[in-house]
Image: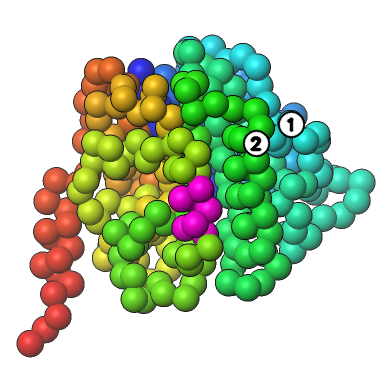
Amino acid sequence: MRIATWNVNSLKARMDAVEAWLGKVEPDILLIQETKLSDTDAPIMPFRMLGYDLVHHGEGRWNGVAIATRVGAADVITNFGDGPVRDSSSGAAVAVSEDDFDPFDEARMISAVCGGIRVTSLYAPNGRVVGSPFYDGKLRWFDRLSRWLAESRSPNEPLILGGDYNVTPSDDDVWDAVAAHGGTHVSEPERAALERLRGWGLEDAYRRVQPALGRFSWWDYRAGMFHRNEGMRIDLLYATAPVAARVVWAEVDREARKGPPTPSDHAPVVLDLDEPGRPFDPGWTGTLERIAARTRPRR
């Protein structure tokens, strides 16, 4: 079974790219984040024509998570089971701005049983600035995630929590730990939140089989950061032991981060269970060496 996660940064804008990528990589399950769609606008039929069922949890202009699966979906849970979220669409009865931040009233979590595994698509809050209300809300959202695991899930069940965590697990997962120091995505409280997840019984399934460094999943659009490989590994696939033990291969598909048209600022992360899936070129061969050669400081 092949499972992937991808923050597409607008499913409407990126649907053609997603369709092409599904044809190339052929995942059995794709966890999607930042769809930026309401449930009524979710592209159910286009996915069905590609052979996938789509379960979607959205609010409109921002956030939004989904699971595309060709192995079925049952027992769907959204928003940790805490009820509906806000309507942020342009036609909402009450106007909502992006600064109206309440992580528990936003579409950031969907979970379903697919192919015998409970898969969960997560879109953690960004946090913006350390010490801000957005950052505090991010930490509270991670506390809710930990509580959901403790109250309703077991480390012994087949479970994957994949998505855009907006946190790097360690300094190995950021292009320059010194340059990033003091900011979000690398702060100790955020990393402690990931450590709590691992302490509960989750493993970084990607790192289980892929020790190579420099393979990031997010690069800012600005200032040529992608071309210099100045990125972060913030798109993670955390799994319980029954699933982690089955992982045989994992990779970040760097090729999917390229354009035109304008790509998402995230690349898909892919892992295979039991046996390798369809081969594809993720674009890493020789890439880091070429980047190092052209960015070497002049003497």
Q: Give coordinates of residue 189: x percent, y percent.
A: 53, 63
The residue carrying mark 1 is: 81
Q: Earlier in the sequence, mark 1 or mark 2?
A: 1
**Residue on which the image places disc 2:** 148
Q: Would residue 260 be visible to someone looking at this image?
A: no
Mark 2 neighbour density, 10 Å: few (under 14) some (14–19) many (20 or more): few
- Whether the magenta-drawn stretch holds residue 191 is answered as yes
Q: Main secondary structure of the magenta part?
A: helix
Q: Which residue is painted at 56% across and 40% down in the image?
A: 122
Give the x, y percent position of residue 167.
Answer: 47, 56
* Circle 1 crowding by C-alpha within 10 Å: few under 14, some 14–19, many from 20: few
Spatial CA span between label 1 and label 2: 9 Å
Placement of the C terminus among the 4 image quadrants? bottom left
| Viewer-proximal residue among 33 and 114 | 114
Q: Quadrant of residue 218?
A: bottom left
Point out the stretch of residues depicted in magenta: 190-196
**Closest to the observer, 272 or 188:** 188
Does the residue at mark 1 contact the one at mark 2 (Cβ under 8 Å)? yes
For mark 2, give the secondary structure: helix
Outermost residue to the left: 299
Task: Please determine whether, in this image, residue 33 is positioned above or below residue 3.
Answer: below
Horizontal and vertical percent for residue 99? 74, 63
